[in-house]
Image (cartoon, rainbow, N blue to C red):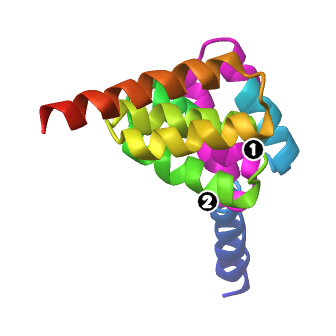
Amino acid sequence: MTLYFIIGVAIGLFYLSRVVRPYPIVTASQLYARAIEFYEQGDIRQALPAIRQLIAVSPRREDARYWLGRILNEQGKHREAVRHLTFAHELNPKSVGTLLELGFAFKMLKKYQDAVKAFEQALVLEPDNTYAAEQLEICQRKLQDISAVR
């Protein structure tokens, strides 16, 4: 009976060591660094799960939400990007990068009024941002074209 108990405990511990912690424990900072490294190497297939893992660990981390939104924008998943970028903007309303990505996502979704708001906010924070000014002008023209058709 004791032998069976010892074998059972050994098997249980072995199983738990595989199921509970199959990967080494890493900090949020390590996950972030890994995700950015993958992104900078052009390996979005590796960057995306690393960012999602970081958000699972730190859901209110603004930089992770920004990067997830940026990657999703690059993949053409603009609706999902808007969700994460909006949350990132709520966490850090002064992030020009987040506003630019959010404006881009809205523009791609043809939500030009929302894009105009994002680009205008970016220009309030950074008046010399030529990208924001150019995108604002494009979106305003699109809105004029839409109004002219109606």
Residue denoted by label 1: 63
Where residue 95 sits, quadrant-wise, is top right
Three-letter code, disc 2: Val
Q: Secondary structure at mark 1?
A: helix
In this rendering, is residue 91 above or below 77? below
Quarter of image, res 128: top right
Location of the C terminus by quadrant is top left
How far across and down, in percent of the image, does residue 70 sit? Answer: 57, 32
Q: Nearer the viewer, residue 132 or 74?
A: 132
Residue hosting label 2: 19
Q: Nearer the viewer, mark 2 or mark 1?
A: 1
**Disc 2 and disc 1: Cα gap in Å?**
30 Å
Q: Residue at x 67, y 65 (%)?
A: 16
Which one is in front, 85 or 106? Answer: 106
Give the residue displayed 77% in from the left and 30% down from the top: 34
Q: Is residue 140 left or right of residue 36?
A: left
- The location of residue 1, given as percent across then percent down, is 66, 88
Residue 71 percent across, percent down from the top left: 54, 30
Residue stretch rendered in magenta on the structure: 37-66
